[in-house]
Amino acid sequence: MNNGQRFASSALTIAEMEARKIRHDSTELWMRGVQPALWLLIFGEVFSTVRGLVPTGYSSYLQYLAPGVLAQSVLFIAIFYGITIVWERDVGLLTKLLSTPSPRLSVVVGKALAAGVRGVFQGIMIFALALIIGVQLRFDPLDVAGVFVVVVLFAMCFASFSMTLASLLKTRDRMMGIGQAITIPLFFASNAIYPVSLMPSWLQTISAVNPLSYVVNAMRAMLITGDYSGLPLDIFALLVSTLFFVACASVMLKRLIE
Amino acid sequence: MYPDGNRAVDDISFSVHEGEIFGLLGPNGAGKTTTIKMITTLARPTAGSVRVFGVDVQRSPQETRGMFGFVPQAISVDGDLTGYENLLIFAKLFFVDRTERKQRILDALEYFGLADKANVLVKRYSGGMMRRLEIAQALVNRPRILFLDEPSIGLDPYSKRQVTEQVKELNREFGTTILITTHDMAEADTLCDRLAIMNTGKIAVAGAPADLKRSVGGDVLTVRTSGGTVVGLPPGLGSVVSSDQGETKILVEDGEKAIPRLTEYFERAGAVVESVSLSRPTLDDVFMKYAKIGLQQEGTFREARSARRTIARHAR
C-alpha cells in the first residue's frame, strides 16, 4: 500500500469502528432524534402561525425550518464529539490509537468521519419525519445525495473543531460547558429558524460569517428552492473551514495524551 | 520534562537485548510510564535518543510504531465492540495484509483462550479477559517487541498468573522481546531476565534479578537459642546483624549450607538451638533499598487517579 492508500484505509477503519458501535447499540442515535423531532413538531407547528416568517419561495414555515433543524441537529452531534475523544483519552483508547503506525492526521479524519456517520443517521431520521408530517421537500436522488455530502462535511468540520477544543480543555466537564456556550449562539445567529432579513443588522453581520448559515443555505437550495446559484460559495466556505479545523485538530491532538 | 521544569525522566540509559524480558520497576511517579511513552513515540524526549532495533524513534516514528505492540496501563480495548472487532480494527490500523488478517485474529484469540468469546461485547468481559484481549490486540502486527505497562494492575491472583504465564510463553515460543513495567516484585522476579529499578526519573540499579538480590546482602538466618551465651561465629560464616534476647540474626552467604554448621557451633558452645529460620532476600528488599526515597515522596495525584480508575474499570 502506498501512503495515500494507507491514509484512506486508516481513516475509513476508524469510521468503521464507529459504525460498528452504532450497530451494536443504536439507543443513543434514536435519543438524538427526539430533539429535532420536537423542533419540527412543536416549535415548527407553533411558529407556522406567525406571519412574515416564511420568505418568498417557500410554501410553509415547516418547509423553511426542516433544513435548519437538520443542520442544527448535526451541529449538536459534532460539537460534542470532543467529549468522546476526551473519554477515549481517559480510558486509554486514544493512546492505543496513536501508537499504531496509522498517520495521526488519518486518526483525526477518521474520527471526524465517524461524526459524519452519526450525522447521516440524523439526516435519515429527519427526512423520514418530514415525509410523515408532509413537509414538501424535493426528493431528487442527486439533491439528497448532495445534502448528505454537506451533512458529512459539516459534521467533520465541527467535530474537528470540537477535537481541537478538547485538546486544549482536556476535561469532559469543560467540554460540556463550552459546547453549550457555542451551539446556542451559533444556532440563533444563523438562518436556521428565521430568515436573515428579520435580524438586526449586527446579527446579520455575524450570520454572514457563521458556517451554519452556509450549510443551511446549501441544504435549502438542494431540498427546496432548487436555486444553485449560491451553492458553490456555500460548499467552498464549508470546505475551507473543514480543512482548517481538521488541520488544527491533527496538530493539537497529541496534547491530549501528553 | 514538564513545563514547570520538573523532570519525569532524567538522563537514563539502558538497553534491552533482543529476545529477553526486561522489567522496568519503580515506585509510583518514578518515570516508568514516561519512559515507555518516549520509546513508543507518544512523548518526545527533550534530549537524547531512543532506538528500536536500530531505528531512531524520533526520526521515523511511523516505522517504529509498526514494529512494536503496546499495552498501555489503562484499558485500551473498546467495550462497545466485540473481541473480534477490537482485533480487526487494530489489524487494519497496523496494515496487516487482508489475506492474513482473519487467520491472525483467530490465532491470537485462540492463543489467549478467548476464541469462544470472540463475538461477545468486550464490556461483558472480566478484567482478566480484557487484559488478555489487549495483549492479543498488541500482537496482531506480529511485533518484534512488546511493551506492557503494568499488565497485572487490578487483576486477581488467578488472572494475574494467567497473564504472566502467557507473557512468558510468548517470549519462549516466538522469541518476542518484552519490556514490562510492574509494581509486583514476585511477578518481576519470575518473569524478567533482567530488570532496572527507576526512582525519581533515574535508573537506580539494573541487572539480573538473582544478581540484584545478591547485592542487597546474602541470606539471613534467625537463630533462637536458650541457655549459654554464644560469643562469635564460626570463622568465615558471616556476620551478626542483631542479637536480642536469645534471638540472633546472622547474615550469611549461603543459608542452607550454613544451618548445620551454625547449629553445631552453637551447641558446642553450650546453647540449645530452639529454631533456625532462613530468609532470603527478595526483589522486595532490592526495591525497598533503591526506591526508598521515591516512596516517601508520594506519586502524583494524576497517576494515582489513573491507576485507580484502571482498577475500577477492570473490576466492573
Image (spheres, coloured by chain):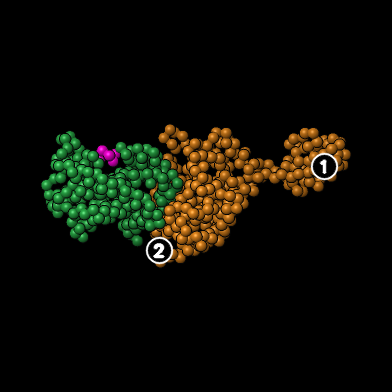
Q: Position of residue B315 (x, y in %)?
A: 53, 48
Q: Using residue A138 as the reference point, say whether residue B56 is left or right of it.
A: right
Q: Which residue is mark 1?
A: B274
Q: Which of the chains bears the disc numbered 1?
A: B
* Residue on which disc 2 sits: B97
On screen, residue A204 above or below B89: above
Q: Residue furthest bottom?
A: B99
Do marks 2 and 1 share a chain?
yes
Residue A69's disc number: none
Q: Quadrant of residue A15?
A: bottom left
**Magenta-span inclusion, residue B82:** no
Q: Colour of chain A?
A: green
In the rendered image, residue B165, in percent from the top left (x then y), is placed at: 58, 56
State left or right for residue B15 relative to residue A4. right
Q: Is residue A173 above or below residue A60?
A: above
Of mark 2 and mark 1, the one earlier in the sequence is 2
Q: Residue furthest left?
A: A56
Magenta part of the protein: which range?
A: A182-186
User: What colour has chain B?
Assistant: orange
Give whichever of A227, A14 is nearer the camera: A227
Amino acid on which the number 2 mark rests in the picture? Asp
Chain to which mark 2 belongs = B
- Main SS of the magenta segment? helix
Q: Position of residue B250 (x, y in %)?
A: 75, 40
Q: Position of residue B22 (x, y in %)?
A: 55, 50
Please tell me which residue is depicted at 43% across the width and 33% down the height of the picture: B4
Q: Badge 1: how crowded within 10 Å, few (<14), some, or many (20+)?
A: few
Q: Residue at x 78, y 46 (%)?
A: B259
